[in-house]
Image (cartoon, rainbow, N blue to C red):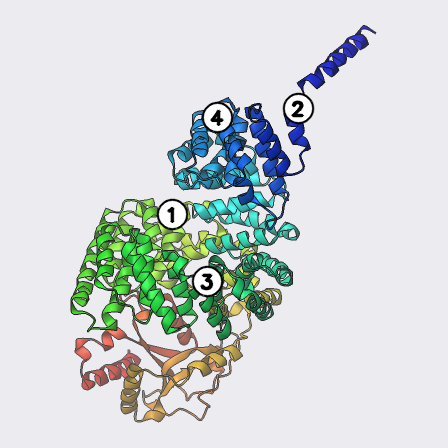
Amino acid sequence: MLRLRAAYEFFWKVFQRGPRTIDPLLSQMHKCVDEDQIFDIIGNNKAKLSEKHVGYACKVLWEFQKEKSNLMKSIPSIRDHPQFLTLCILAKDKIELMDDNTLVNVLYIMLRFAVEAHDSLIQHMVMEAWRRVERFDLKMLSKFSTCLVDQQMHFSPLMGRIADIVNRNLDSVQDLRILSVLMVNISSVISQNFCEQLVNKTELLLDTVDPSQFNTSIRIVRFLQNIRYNSHSLLKKCNHVFINNIAHLNLDALSIILALYQSLQFNNFPFQVLAREKLSKMIALYYDPTCFVKLFVALGPLAGPMEEKQLMSALQTMMDELTSQQALAIVVTMEEMNCKDSYLIEKIASVLYKYLHVYKSVELAKITKALIHLHHYNLELIKILRKLLLSHLRKNIIPSEISVLVYAIALLPFPCLDESGLSRVESILPQCSLSDLNTFASSLSKWVQHDHSYLNNVHQKNIKLLPQLNTYGYQRLQKASNLNALWEELKYVHGEWFEEELLEETIATLQRLSDQITYTNITNFTTFIVKASYLSAPVLDKIASVTIQDIDKIHPLAIHSILLPFSVLNYDPPQKDKFFGACIQRLNSELSLFEPHILVFLGFTLALSECFPKDLIKAIFNIEFLTKLDSQIQYLPPFLNIRTYGRLMEFNRAVCLECPEFEVPWFHDHYCQQQYNKVNGSINAVHHQIYKMLGEILGGPNYIKPSALTPYGYIVDFECILDKEKKPLPHGSQDEDELPSVLWGPDVHESRSALPLGAQRVALEFLDSRAFCKNTTHLKGRSSMKKRHLEILGYRVIQIPHLEWNSMELSTKDAWMEYLRERMFAEVQS
C-alpha cells in the first residue's frame, strides 16, 4: 500500500506540473498546417521567441517543404517572406544561446532555403559551429559537413578538421549511413592512406547494413568516384544492393547510379538490363522537360532501337521548352548515342543557338565537341561559337579551362588562334599539366597544318610555342616525385607530340619512381604502357614483382589489365611462370565475377602469351556462356561489340590450333568470310611494290596470291608455293574469295587441297610500325601469335620489317629484289 501511495503521489505531482511546463508558442507551432500560420506566430511574438522557438520554427517550415513534390516546393516565396527575414534576424541574435543540435539544424535549414553563403547569419553560424566542432557527435558532424559542402567549402581548413575528427574516431564508427555522408563530404581533403582505411571500414560495415538502405550504397559509390578509387569488391557489394532494390529505385536514383558507374567505367550487365527495362517503362510517364531530360540522359546510352525511337519522338514534342542546361544535357547525350537523326540534330542546334550567350567556357566547349561529332556544320552557328570561344579564352586564367577552349577551337573548320589567344596560351604554360600541354601541342600542330599563309607573325608565334611546350613538358617530368599525381596528368595524354617529344622521358620517370608502384595503382601504369606501346623491362619487371607479392590483395577484375602489357608487348618477366601462375590461380576461383565480354578479352590476352587455362576455356566455350554473351552484346557500344566478336574468334582460333586436346570446335568460318569480304581488294603502295617484284622473281603474278585467306581466317599479305626444288608452283583454281575448309584437331594443315610431295606454302608478311614496340624492333604479341599459328598450319613464314624495307641499304629496286630473293630462297636452304 505504501508503494502504491508513493507512486500515486509521484504521478499526481507530474500531472499537476505538466500543464505549467508546456510552452504555448511551441504548442501553437506544432498545430500549424502551413507556412503562413508559422509566419503569423513569428510576426506576433517577436519579443517572446527564444532560441528554441527559432529552431522549432525553422524545423516546421522545412517539414512543410519536404512534404511537397518538387513542382510544388515554394522555397523562393518562403525565403523572400518578410517574416522569414525576421526569423533570420532572431536566429542571428540567439546563435550563442542555441544548443549544438539546434545550431547545426538551423544552419542546415537556412541553406536549404537558399540563404546565401555570404549572408552574415550563415557566416556567424559557421564560425560558432567551428568553435564547437570537437564536441559534435558524428551524426551532427555529418550534417555540419553537408552545410560546408553547400557553401563550396570542400577544401577549407574546417573540412580538414572534420576529416581529422573522423580519422581519430574511425575505429568506433558503426553507423555506415552517417559515415557515408561524411566520406563523400571530406573526400577532397583526405590522404590516400585515409582513403584506403575508409574503403576497408566501409567493406566491413556494408554487410551489417539493412539492404533496403540503397542511398547509403549510392553515397559509397559517389565516394569512390570522388577519390578515383575503383574498388571492385566494394562496387560489387553496392551493385548487389541496387539490383535487390531495383523495384524501389526511382528515376533520380537510377540516373545517379548510372552516371557514377559511367564515371568509374564500371559496367554491370545485370544491372544495366534491369535499369534499361525500368527506365523504358518511364518514357510514357514524363511530359515535363525536367524529368524527361533526366530520363533521356540515363536511358539514351543504354537504349535499343525501339527505346531510342520512343525517346527521340518524345524529345521532338518538347524541344522548344528546354532550358539552356537541359539543351546542353540533351546534345551531349545525343553525341554519346551517335545520333543520326538530322532533323533532331538541327532542332537541338537551334535551341542551343538561343542560349549561346549564357553558357560558361567549358559548356561552350562541350557544345562544340558534340555538334562537330554529330556532323552539324551550320556556318553561322560555327562562327558565333568560334567568336564566343575566343572571347572566353582571352579572359580565362584557369589552365585546364584554357586547354579545353583551345581543344574546342581546334575542332572547328577555322581552327587558328589570333595573336591575343596565343598570348593567353603562352602566359599560362608554366602552370600547365602534361595533359594541358598535350592539348596545346596537338592543337598548334593542326593550326600550322591548316593555313601556312595565316597572318605571318601569328604563324611564327605558333612555331615558337612548340619548343616551349617541349621544355615545360620535360621540366614537369623531371620534377615529378609522386607517381599517383603523375598518373592524373598522364591518363588522358596521347598523340604524336607526346610520343615524339616526351614518351621516352616519361618512361624514364616511371623507372625512377617505380618503387611507388603498388597493388593499388598498378593497373594505372599497365594501362599507360599498353597505350604507349613502349617496352620498358625495368617497369614491367617491377609490375610483375608487385603482382606476385600482393596477388591476394589484387581484385580478380584487375588481373586482365595487369596481364595486358606482357601479352601485347610479347614480354616475359624473369619470373614468368610464377607471375602467370599467380594470376591464373587468382582468376580460376572467381571466373563468375567477370562480364562475358571481359572473360573473352581475358582469354585472348592469355592466349597471346601462350597460356591456356583449362577452367577459363571450359567457362567460355559452352552454349550457356555463348548465349549469355549474345544477349549482352546489345548493351555494349558498337565499337566494343565489334571488338568482342573479333576477340572471341581469335581466342577460338588460338585454342583450336594450340590446344587441340580440348576439342573445342571452330565455329567462325562465316564470320571470317564476312571480315575478309570487307577488306579484300584494298592494297597500299608498299604492298603493290612488293607484289610486282615478287611477280618478277617468281615468274609471273599467277605464282603469287595477294591478300590470301588461310584456314582459320588469317589474311596473309602474299602466299606462294615452292616445290621441293625451291621452284615456284602456280596457284590452283580455288576461288580467291572462298575460305579454305578446315577441321578441328591436330592435323589442321592437312585439311586443304594436297600439295606435291615436299612442296611448302610460304606466307610473306610486310610488318609496319604497329607490329613492333615503339622503342625497339621487338615483335609484339599479335604478330608473334600469327607467325606461330601460320607455322602450325604448315606455312613457312617470312616477315619483312618496315625498318629493313625502308632502310638506306634498300633504296634501289635491285637491292629490294635481291633482299626478297634471299628471304624467299636462302631461308629454305637453311
**Dividing the image into 4 quarters, which one contains the N terminus?**
top right
Question: Callout 4 environment at 10 Å: few (<14), some (14 to 19), or many (20+)?
Answer: some
Q: Nearer the viewer, mark 3 or mark 1?
A: 3
Q: Secondary structure at mark 1?
A: helix
User: Which residue in the structure is indicated by mark 1?
Assistant: 546
Image depth: mark 3 or mark 4 in front = 4
What residue lies at 60% left-to-right and 42% top-to-bottom? Answer: 65
Structural distance between the alpha carbons of marks 2 and 4: 22 Å
Q: Quick one: label 1 or label 2, which is nearer the N terminus?
A: 2
- The circle on residue 332 is 3
Q: Earlier in the sequence, mark 3 or mark 2?
A: 2
SS under mark 4: helix
Q: Which residue is mark 4?
A: 93
Q: Earlier in the sequence, mark 3 or mark 1?
A: 3
Marks 3 and 2, Cα distance to the nearest angstrom? 56 Å
Q: Nearer the viewer, mark 1 or mark 2?
A: 2
Q: Are marks 3 and 4 in contact (CB under 8 Å)?
A: no
Inter-mark Cα distance, 3 to 4 = 48 Å
Using the numbered discs, state the Cα–Cα distance from disc 1 to disc 2 in whole angstroms: 70 Å
- Of mark 1 and mark 4, the one earlier in the sequence is 4
Measure how far apart labels 3 and 1 are at the Cα level: 40 Å
Circle 3/circle 2 CB separation < 8 Å: no
